[in-house]
Amino acid sequence: MINVGIVGGTGYTGVELLRLLSQHPQVRLKAITSRKEAGLPVADMYPSLRGHVDLAFVTPDDAGLAQCDVVFFATPHGVAMAQARELLAAGVKVIDLAADFRLKDVVEFERWYGMPHSCPDLLAEAVYGLPELNREAIKAARLIGNPGCYPTSVQLGYAPLLKAGLIEPTGLIANCASGVSGAGRKAEVHTLMAEASDNFKAYGVKGHRHGPEINQQLRTIAGDEQVHALFVPHLLPLIRGIHSTLYARLNSAGQAADLQATFEAFYQGERFVDVLPAGSAPETRSVRASNTVRIAVHKPLPDTVMVLVVEDNLTKGASGQAVQCMNLMCGLEEHLGLTQVPVLP
Amino acid sequence: MINVGIVGGTGYTGVELLRLLSQHPQVRLKAITSRKEAGLPVADMYPSLRGHVDLAFVTPDDAGLAQCDVVFFATPHGVAMAQARELLAAGVKVIDLAADFRLKDVVEFERWYGMPHSCPDLLAEAVYGLPELNREAIKAARLIGNPGCYPTSVQLGYAPLLKAGLIEPTGLIANCASGVSGAGRKAEVHTLMAEASDNFKAYGVKGHRHGPEINQQLRTIAGDEQVHALFVPHLLPLIRGIHSTLYARLNSAGQAADLQATFEAFYQGERFVDVLPAGSAPETRSVRASNTVRIAVHKPLPDTVMVLVVEDNLTKGASGQAVQCMNLMCGLEEHLGLTQVPVLP
Amino acid sequence: MINVGIVGGTGYTGVELLRLLSQHPQVRLKAITSRKEAGLPVADMYPSLRGHVDLAFVTPDDAGLAQCDVVFFATPHGVAMAQARELLAAGVKVIDLAADFRLKDVVEFERWYGMPHSCPDLLAEAVYGLPELNREAIKAARLIGNPGCYPTSVQLGYAPLLKAGLIEPTGLIANCASGVSGAGRKAEVHTLMAEASDNFKAYGVKGHRHGPEINQQLRTIAGDEQVHALFVPHLLPLIRGIHSTLYARLNSAGQAADLQATFEAFYQGERFVDVLPAGSAPETRSVRASNTVRIAVHKPLPDTVMVLVVEDNLTKGASGQAVQCMNLMCGLEEHLGLTQVPVLP
Amino acid sequence: MINVGIVGGTGYTGVELLRLLSQHPQVRLKAITSRKEAGLPVADMYPSLRGHVDLAFVTPDDAGLAQCDVVFFATPHGVAMAQARELLAAGVKVIDLAADFRLKDVVEFERWYGMPHSCPDLLAEAVYGLPELNREAIKAARLIGNPGCYPTSVQLGYAPLLKAGLIEPTGLIANCASGVSGAGRKAEVHTLMAEASDNFKAYGVKGHRHGPEINQQLRTIAGDEQVHALFVPHLLPLIRGIHSTLYARLNSAGQAADLQATFEAFYQGERFVDVLPAGSAPETRSVRASNTVRIAVHKPLPDTVMVLVVEDNLTKGASGQAVQCMNLMCGLEEHLGLTQVPVLP
């Protein structure tokens, strides 16, 4: 059994971790921290967990995190980097669901997240936790930067094309849309139901933090510093789900290729990536509350590829992916605790 | 032309007042105050008003409210009572959309709203602004306590029965449900879209502020201090709309009465109350964004009456009703500025 | 392993059965029938099941249902009664999710469902499948009438009061609200999204089929033919979830009783019924996609009890309950395949 | 006063026409036809119109359409072309909200709409009813093909760029999303609330009827047969609203141009097109239930322009635009009956 601690269990990635880990056959939940809610039974905040999670929130000092095998940070940006070093020194594996260990370039990090990075050396060591593209490194890692929700879907959509060298490196457009749970459980006017439901809009139009993460990773995947995607997020009037509509221009190899076969071969054997039959349009609900990503590839024009990707932003886009990384880091079967069938309707 | 000022124009009753008043043929909007947003064009906060409202928010001191004919308070509880006396002294008519002038009993006010009442004399003078039940007093008033959203629908549903003496005075049950705009435009976790959409629950189960208002008014309507309704509100996953399912036991007169005819006669000639044909079930969308209330009366058991009432909580339940009062107070036709057809679908 | 067949797997109770049974550790899915979709892989209709259900729909004749241990009917009313006898004769246990075996009175059945009942003898044998109230009979049954969605929540809410004799037998009011999945996957205008979302209304105001089922069962629970509840359903703008707000008048024993203790004792040890702490208001989302019912009991007036109940209408209100019955009938642990944590947010 | 008839008033464009025309100061509604609902008061189908529309549906034969000044066809494709000739001969102006008179190429029409075109000569005469781009022709027209909902927003977004020659003619991408009312009031499974709410997907991925309309019109606007846009529609979980995210590559002139100024100048004086300040992201709710389109132009990369456009698909995207055309054809002020302030929240 793996002993697990969660730092910051009051937000949506926290409660999603609890949903998944409480059903994981090899996990023992040891501690869930919240300074603000210390003493409160977790199930009092989230009645959905009554009968499944018996712990109360504790302060970080009382959590015994150093005795855990794995600690997840489901915290605001900046928390994990302040605490990771000590845990790592104690032999604990660390998975950060925030952005502290995603961007390899400290200057970029500081520009987009508005704070200095306190441990660049750990940043250099940290492994980007996208198993389908980085599995062996994750197995060997002791510190994971868990990918952003949008970047997960964008990378999984472009990777087969970039790896096979089928598209022009520039002019990529990632037109994405996310449910409101991506904004977290913060009291803010713009995500009130009276504001965000019955509405749709683009946002982050002057630049969004997931843009540099997407481009860093697409360049790594392609091995080509020229690669550039324009990332445009939109806010959907639903709770869970990301839909990415990805465009790129096919180069001559791409125009000649069998794109459907390329995708199917690339994700052959991947349990959490489902390449749909040719002609499909994936729906966000088809992955609701599951760790699965579904992908459809189209060639609407002779020189243009369009890839459609759906994921649940809280599961494969956050907490499910983190559990998948944990499984790999701990030598468990990759799918343990992640076998839920999507909830439909 | 009526010169109008609005104190506190940033919330949902404020923007609804602006929607209605900017279309009113006899109103000139003079000032909209917000200490916090002073200087900001109103249409920058609410792009829906671009091209319709050209004013910027001003501080109360710069608003020239004393030169207005009518001032609306679309403010938190406690603001109107602090400012009303001075405006009234200047000859301004005042309509408060908050609760400062609804509850006649100061002790009750202080218990439910958690603040002392600073002007009990004005409370005594204030007129309860429900035109269908109180029209002549409103015409003569200089200070209006605009009814709460739930109380409007509950009173209009029970009034024909109480006035005709057809129901037992106790055991009334008002099972009501409201859209989330009723909670206002405050940054709070429980009304985030990720919390309140795809969800339904009762709330205020230990007592809700609209309970004493409802009972005060039902007693006044009936002329019977014994009358008591149990009020149970629920939170709907939609933005606008209140649905009240009202139950009462019919007395012997009620069991013998033609309830449909009673309701039709009671609301004969009322432009904003629509009694539906026998057997109907009104939908909240049938009054969306309009000042109309629709009512259906049923007799599901020989000794039981059930009344179904729908209203738009921001229009007839708040700002539309306030405009209706203004029209009456200023000698205008009651429906001016309130002729919008409900938006469906 | 239990061999299971499903008749009529294309509707919402069918896909929910598939979601649950595909995760059940002791079930082997043998056949899913649909005359209309025969030959179509189930996962082509429901992409959420890709990777979880590999069967294709077959015609009833090709399904080998007589070789199954258990057959579920997730069909329109009238189908199960035409096919049950033959399956029972072959030693198959039958669970009908429609209404064919719920109402014990054939005349009532024919009045509300508009068709003759073809096997009254089986009706007499059939067991009403609400395990918390009828567990031993279910264990011994070979034919189950699975309860309606509303009746499940209403019975579980009133049962502790009726069994303990704490309420007056008449004047019960069951004010209920359901998500739209309760209407099934039929192409009809009134459940289109453009009609049913952003809307709320009562329906079935002249009488709803679940009314007689509720009253039959409440009388059975109480052992009192006088018991009568007025059932008023409403349509919620969400997909899954039923919320019941139940009212009754307390008799003198009830007025003296500790209602919270009564409920906690009554449901002591029940895995799928969660009595919330005093003062709570359960939310539909707290049981989303799970087999759990949550209940809160209130005494808003000295002579009045109010019980709030939430369930997922497709799980505990239909397919989950059917699986729970199957477990009991087959000597399995009651909770197998039903341990999903509710999905929140 | 203009005498107006509506053929096919039971769908969403029909009820939206009724909402707008019943508030139009210069319109007298003479007849609303429906073969299926003949005799039914319109307000019985749409209670939102109670008190606003007193007509009952009539059969086309009883409608006296030839005595109207203007007849709107809010019918399925193929109806208007069968009836237009006779009405035109009687001197009636005809506005078709379906697609019969949009596509100038009969072969294209027959390919996308699956029916022969019965009056190619009228097609040649028909004027495309997008006032901002075609005002003078509309004034002189007697037969209008009212634009599709998506094409309206796509054209208004690209027009300033195409007219000024600022973008490359190919590689345009129109990534659009519409609320479900765009699918009409037809009983179909895929637009049930239990299917379409809490969901998002692309659709029409093999080609959508609005694609050829968009490209026909963009070529006309640009005067360049090379122009090509890839049109990708998505289905939003809301009722009203279209959001178009438009991409194009700037040519050298475009890279040097002040795009904001270009748009502001192009739409100078247009009452129904609102160019937002630089840096904005328009929301669908900011135009809800109004005839306004809001547009923001961005230059996210030196060689790329992105235009964001919102409209209400039933108003400016259908019925509102049709009324705007009627006003022009009849010599009325263009905005009559279209001055509603958007409904927010």
Image (cartoon, coloured by chain):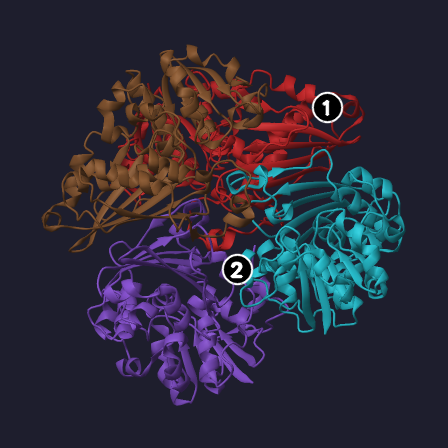
Chain colours: A brown, B cyan, C red, D purple
Closest to the observer: D306 or B197?
Answer: D306
Closest to the observer: C256 or D315?
Answer: D315
Residue that label 1 marks: C165
Image position of A18 with respect to A343: above or below: above
The number of numbered badges drawn on the structure is 2
Query: Dividing the picture into quarters, in which one does residue D304 lie?
Result: bottom left
Closest to the observer: D232 or C290?
Answer: D232
Please tell me if label 1 and label 2 are on a single chain: no
Q: Residue furthest bottom?
A: D90
Q: Position of residue B326 (x, y in %)?
A: 75, 65
Q: Chain of mark 2?
A: B
- Residue C186 placement, left or right of A33: left
> What separation in Å lies between label 1 and label 2 (alpha carbons)?
59 Å
Quadrant including the N terminus of chain C: top left
Q: Position of residue A114 (x, y in %)?
A: 43, 37
Residue that label 2 marks: B47
Name the amino acid, label 1: Gly
Closest to the observer: A52 or A190?
Answer: A190
Image position of D148 with respect to A56: above or below: below
- Mark 1 nearby-residue class (10 Å; few <14, some 14–19, many ≥20): some
Residue C210 visible in image: yes
**In what element is the residue under mark 2?**
helix
Q: Are marks 1 and 2 in contact (CB under 8 Å)?
A: no
Query: Dividing the picture into quarters, in which one does residue D318 lie?
Result: bottom left
Name the amino acid, label 2: Pro
Residue D114 visible in image: no
- Mark 2 nearby-residue class (10 Å; few <14, some 14–19, many ≥20): many
Query: Dividing the picture into quarters, in which one does residue D88 lie?
Result: bottom left
Image position of D148 with respect to A153: above or below: below
Q: Position of residue B190 (x, y in %)?
A: 58, 38
